[in-house]
Image (cartoon, grey):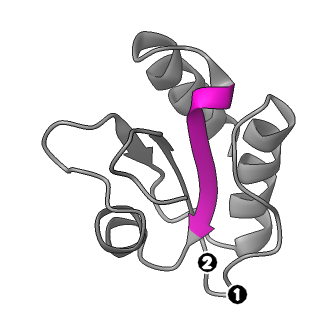
Amino acid sequence: MYQTINDFDSYISKNGGIYSQWYAGVATDPKKRLFNDHNVDQQSDAWIHSYDLGTDIKARNVEQHFLSKGCKGAPGGGDRSSCYAYAYKINGHTRE
């Protein structure tokens, strides 16, 4: 989990670094969530997701870390199978 937080922090820093311009969440299928639900462009947008963290609690801890830093999003989404954390930089075409 801590490696995921470090990886996300590093990625966000390299791609804009302003947390309020990013959305963080949890998902069972992060690619579907990113590219279908949030309309993130896989080729041109800045996005990242974790490997399977094993439990939704670990994924939610990652999510909460970034929400507390100012990322958009809200706790409580997903379900017990939401073992992945993800984040993307918000753009005019993305859907929060």
What is the x, y in percent for residue 92? 38, 42
Q: Amino acid at mark 2?
A: Ser
Residue located beneath label 1 in the image: 79
Q: Is residue 29 left or right of residue 32?
A: right
Q: Main secondary structure of the magenta part?
A: strand
Residue at figure coordinates x 59%, y 45% from the top left: 23
Residue at figure coordinates x 54%, y 32% from the top left: 8
Residue at figure coordinates x 71%, y 87% from the top left: 80
Residue located beneath label 2 in the image: 82
The kind of secondary structure element at disc 2 is loop
Task: Tell me the tag on residue 67.
Answer: none
Q: Is residue 52 above or below residue 5?
A: below
Instruction: Choose between 1 and 64: the one closer to the eye.
Output: 64
Instruction: Choose between 8 and 74: the one closer to the eye.
Output: 74
What is the x, y in percent for residue 32? 33, 74
What is the x, y in percent for residue 29? 42, 77
* Quarter where residue 70 is shown: top right
Residue at figure coordinates x 68%, y 46% from the top left: 1
The kind of secondary structure element at disc 1 is loop
Q: Quadrant of the C terminus?
A: bottom right
Q: Is residue 1 magenta?
A: no
What is the x, y in percent for residue 90? 47, 39
- Residue neighbourhood size for the residue with mark 1, other residues' Cα within 10 Å, grouped as few (<14), some (14–19), many (≥20): few
Q: Which portion, as a residue range, is magenta? A: 20-26
Q: Is residue 22 magenta?
A: yes
**Marks 2 and 1 close (CB-CB < 8 Å):** yes
